[in-house]
Amino acid sequence: MSETDKSYGLLTQTSGIEETRNPARQRHLPAQAALDWLKAGWRDLLTQPGLSIAYGVAVFVVTLALAWTLLASGRDYILFPAIAGYLIVAPVLAFGLYEKSRALEAGERPTLRTMLLVRPSAGAQVFYTGLLLCLLMLVWNRAAVLVYALFFGVRPFPGLDGIVGMLLTTPTGWAMLVVGTLVGGLFAAFGFAISVFSIPMLLDQRTDALTAMGTSMAMVWNNLTPTIAWGAIVMALYAASAVTGFLGLVVIFPLLGHATWHAYRAMR
């Protein structure tokens, strides 16, 4: 039986991982490519750095406003999930940074106005993609609350001062951390896969939101080595910015935004 004659069913031969991959989408890049994207992003940041830093300051202010709103409204119980889920919608927030990198690549001179008033090739499809990513973030926040309820029942949230001790000094807390990390990891992996290349693609190409997200996931699946390395770099730098009270976002967010554009161009 030839490869084209194969059929798969519940009680027949199952397909292997390699059979789900598309050679046309494989770029055969090493893990080192992720560092090359980061270096290219750093060069873009240093070119007219004021634009990128101003963008980073704006993102930092938005992040602080989000945290303050959750605390002031008594929703501190979703602060940590919201901070973790912030990465899901971050690619949309970096749209202006992609525009700056695109302009530099094309030999144009970017301005703050062009970065803030971007005219993507896909038009309003960017809005639909952003809406879907926001919905995914909301689902993750609800899932995080459910995980807490599964382990601690109807016990009220002890506040930011008490939750750390509850998680780190009790067996139930450790179990919740393990399960929550696994569940959060699934959301993070899915969010990363559908967004890492889709938002730059919508800026660069005339396509629809679902096609862009599907293509992004396909590119990640067919190029696991460099994309996993890139995801690890993003997580590490985001964690470093969190340690600084998110002040590090002033530099780290623009750096990652510019680098993501170069990652997209390498995978296109």
Image (spheres, helix red, strand yellow):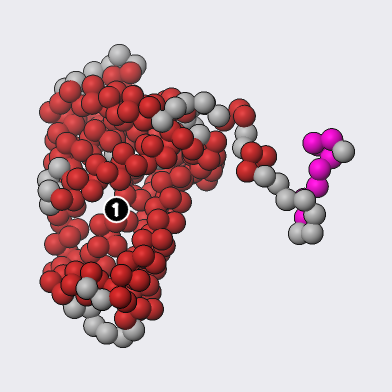
Q: Residue furthest top?
A: 107
* Rendering coords of residue 246 (x, y %): 15, 49
Up-down relation of residue 176 to residue 117 (above or below): below
Secondary structure of residue under mark 1: helix
Instruction: Write the residue at 81% across / 43% down.
Output: 6
Verify whether residue 8 appears in magenta: yes
* Rendering coords of residue 196 (x, y %): 40, 40
* Rendering coords of residue 224 (x, y %): 49, 38
Q: Please, what is the three-letter code of the amino acid marked with disc 1?
A: Tyr
Splitting the image into 4 quarters, where does residue 252 fall?
top left
Tell me if residue 90 can be seen: yes
- For the magenta stretch, what is the residue range? 2-9
What residue does disc 1 label?
Answer: 86
Q: Residue furthest bottom?
A: 154
Between 121 and 134, the residue placed more toward the observer is 134
* Rendering coords of residue 177 (x, y %): 32, 66
Instruction: Write the residue at 30% across / 45% down.
Output: 235
Up-down relation of residue 254 to residue 68 (above or below): above
On-image quarter of the N terminus: top right
Badge 1 crowding class, 10 Å Cα cut-off, few under 14, some 14 to 19, many 20 or more, is some
Up-down relation of residue 77 to residue 86 (above or below): below
Our reading of the magenta stretch's main secondary structure is loop
